[in-house]
Structures are given as C-alpha cells and as structure tokens.
Amino acid sequence: MKKVQHYINGQFLDSKCGEFFDNINPMTGQLLSKVALGREDEVNAAVAAARAALSGEWGQMKLNDRIALMYEIANEIDRRFDDFLEAECLDTGKPYNIARHIDIPRGAANFKVFADTMKSHAEEAYQADTPDGRKMFNYSIRKPKGVIGVISPWNLPLLLMTWKVGPAMACGNTVVVKPSQVTPTTTSLLGEVMSKVGVPAGAYNVVQGKGSITGNLLTAHKDIDAITFTGETKTGEMIMQACSKGVRDVSLELGGKNPAIIFADCDMEKAIAETYRSVFANSGQVCLGTERVYVQRPIFDEFVSKLKERASKIKLGIYNDETVDMGPVVSAAHRDKVLEFYDIAKKEGANIILGGGAPKMEGELANGFFVEPTIWTGLPETATVVKEEVFGPCCHIAPFDTEEEVIKMANDTKYGLASTIFTENLDKAHRVASQIDSGIVWINSWFLRDLRTAFGGMKGSGIGREGGHHSLEFYTELKNICIKM
Ligand code: NAD
C-alpha cells in the first residue's frame, strides 16, 4: 500500500508513534494510500527545523539565489507535471482536463510570480526638513516574518497551497504546511521537488494530519510567527482565536456565497457559458464559484432554460476519461453534506429545474461520491441554500427587476468573496461593480486571474489581501529607518 509521509527538515518520515489514516479515492470509495498522522512530535520537529533554517543556509541565501531557486521549483513541477496531475486527480476525483489546465500550471506559476514580485519590488522613501534647519531621510525595508504555518483546503490542493508557500518562501520565510487530510499527496510530492532542486533543509516542511489534531497543534505552537489559512469561515474563526495568543498575524481566505447578476442587456451566450463554468466547474467546489444567480425578469425564463440545457449535458465519470466534464465531490462526508442541502432545498419548497440528488453510477464508480448538477428556482431569499455555502455543483436562480433591487439582494449575505456581472452596458457594469461588497467582481467573465492583483474576501470571506506585492504585507515585516542628515 502506498504511503504519504511527512517532509521535515529535508527528510521523508513516518510519525514517531507510527499512526496512519486512510486516503480514499473519491471516484471509487476505495483506499488510495495510508497517510502519516502528525502529532506533537512531528509538529515540534517541523517548527524547530523551520526556525533553524532561518539562521542557516536558507536564511543567509542572497535574494537573487532565492529567486533563481523559486524558478527551479516551478520548472521541476513542470518536468514532473504528469506525477502531479495523477496525484491531484486521484486525491480529488477531478478530471485531468481541469487539473491539467488549472491546478498544476497554476501551482508552478505561483513560484514564478512571487519571485518576479521580489525582483521588482521597491519601497517608499521620504526626505523632510527638521526644526533645526537640517534634513531627515526616511526609508523602509522589509524582513521575512519568520516561520509561517500554512493550512490549506482540498478543493485546489496544490494551487492554493503554493499560493501561500510561493510568496512566503520568495520573501525569505520558512514554512510548515498542513494540507487537507483528504488531499495530502501533492504537498508531499512538492517535498521531492524541494529536495531535487536543492532547497536547504528546513525551509519547506510538511506535517500531514487532521485539522482537529495536527492543525490545532500547529496553530497553537508558540514558535509559529504567523498562520495563513484557506478554508471554511468557522475554521477561520477558530484559527484567528488561536493566533490571538502571542498576537500572531493571520491571513484568512474563507468561504463565499457568490452572486451572479445577469442583466437583460447581456450577451446571452457569454452569460450562459461563464455562469455554467462558475456554477459547475470542479463539481462546484471553487470558493469563487457562483451559487446565487439573479436574472433580470424579461430574460429569466430563457436564461433558466438555456442553463438547464447546457448543464443537463454534463458527463459525470472517471478522471482519465477526456470526455468527462465532472468528477465526484471530494469525500463521503462532503457528499453527505451537499445531499443534505439538496434535501433541505426540497423541503423548503424549491422548484427543482435539474438534478437534486445522487446519480446512479455504474461499475467501479458505483461507490464514488457523485452528486447531480442541480438548479433550483422559486425559493425566497431567506432559504437555507440561498444563505449558506453549499460548495457543490448547484445554484438557485431568482428574478429581479431593478438595478437597486439586485445590488441589495447580492449584498444581503454574510460573505463577500466574488461576484460576476453580465451586461453589455459599460456604464452599468462599472456602476454596479463599485457597489457590490466582494473582494473581486468579474464583468462578463469568471476566474480570469492576474496573479499580481489583490485577492481576498470582505466580511465573513476573510481578512487580508494576497497577490503580487499585496502578499508582502503579510509575509514580511515592514521597518522604517530614519536618518538625521
Ligand atoms: P476546512 O476549513 O474544513 O479545512 C481547511 C483546512 O483546515 C484543512 O487542512 C483542515 O484539516 C484544517 N483544519 C480544520 N479544522 C482545523 C482546526 N481546528 N485547526 C487548524 N486547522 C484546521 O475547509 P475545506 O472543507 O478543506 O475547504 C472548503 C472551504 O474552503 C469552503 O468554505 C471554501 O469556500 C473555502 N475556500 C476558500 C478559498 C478562498 O480563497 N477564500 C479558497 C478555497 C476554499
């Protein structure tokens, strides 16, 4: 049986107590590998290695050498593209044709983008008069923050983990990563890449394990300087509380309940194509995905029928079938959670336009964690699936009449991560975009990302912004130096 180990101080290790837990293939329900379960010994060893590396070879490395190493990591991920692709698809159940275009290339790009940021970054400087007629000169420098704990989710495991590890290491920090227990493999594979390209031991460490055990130990560890977390809002709240001990910094990228606003003057084909992707891509397990669709009344029926027509062609199946559009959701627990939301929608009186349950799969997929692509209409704005994040392949579509009304509906949520607007009227697009409470607003598109731009959520969707030089705010300490001339 294949095992997935910790990567601590440049070594692959089992847990000291020899404990493992199961990694299940979500397409078949079969055992995929045994994963080492990290406890106090492993967390302590990883944090100590990360601390030591800050004053060792890694900490003393010249910026240009570090930047070159970041490029080497990205190039080695590219060279081992097929290994990463296979591992990511087996852990998550997502089809090759998604991971090949998004997860793995973006996983590599995250190292290059932040290496480039470090190469070109400049700080502020001021010259001013002093009361005694002389001058003072102020300038800023940035220092790495120290040991960064990275706690990542399962929906885009490599991509979201490197979105943190890339900038953290480019800034000169060391990291201890705890990936999601249901998608451990690519984090461990990245350890092989680090060894291969010569990243000094201790700069990148991985402790495998469960959130309630390993994650808790990591966030509570007094020698961790900051935690960067991506995951559910309620987990983020717990992590923030843990970080208050020792006043340690925290970056939170959390849940969403993202609206799409479709105006009657939209390009219908564009609106259908992009909304189809934003609702159903990755089985709806994308934090930026749409779960609430608001359509202006004159085109409501046409939109619902066209989205249904497009979504009813979705082919569910196995990852290596290139004709498959959608895999299962990531785990039995998540399947049960999504199906519970589907039941609640039915009980609360939803009009089920498509799906609404679990499909019957054949052969080896019969025990996989598949759910049906689902569209509802007819629910009030107070309904559970209009308010709560489902994180499955589903959306509720509601009609609206005026711009003012839809802005209110879109903003009536505890979240504020992403939104989309479809209109061919540029004035309206700008006007509405500026009034939506979300960290990113896409106009006539979805998931178009320039990694130099600020990324993050408002309200319950998170704290802080990352991307390009915004990431430096979290991964470095800014210091002002004042000279009297
Ligand atoms: P989750 O919160 O259950 O788990 C995320 C990570 O936290 C995992 O590694 C888990 O083991 C760990 N964890 C759980 N409890 C912990 C604890 N008490 N202490 C420390 N660590 C703990 O989230 P998930 O189910 O893996 O991911 C789905 C969620 O992530 C959704 O809500 C989604 O919207 C959100 N998400 C947000 C973004 C974003 O950029 N805002 C991106 C992707 C996913």
Image (cartoon, helix red, strand yellow):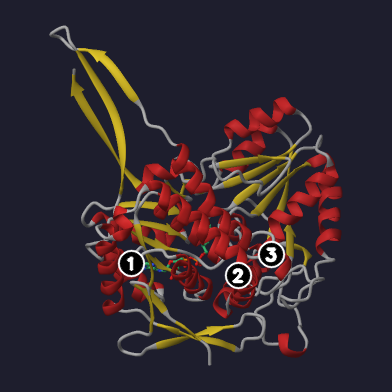
- Residue 202 circle label: 1
Q: CA distance from mark 3 to mark 1?
A: 30 Å
Observer-nearest residue: 278 or 224?
A: 224
Residue 284 appears left or right of 22: right
SS under mark 2: loop
Query: What residue appears at the point 57 percent right and 58 percent down from the top-left corner?
Result: 108
Please give the residue where the numbered disc 2 appears in the rendered image: 80
Indicate if the residue with disc 3 has its beta carbon within 8 Å of ligand 1.
no
Residue contact at pointers 3 and 1, CB within 8 angstroms: no
Q: Residue at x 43, y 45 (%)?
A: 471
User: Which is nearer the N-term, disc 3 or disc 2?
Assistant: 2
Mark 1: amino acid: Gly
Tag 3: amino acid: Arg
Q: Would you say residue 188 is visible in this rendering?
A: yes
Which residue has dot 3 on it? 100
Q: Residue at x 79, y 65 (%)?
A: 354
Residue positioned most to the left: 132
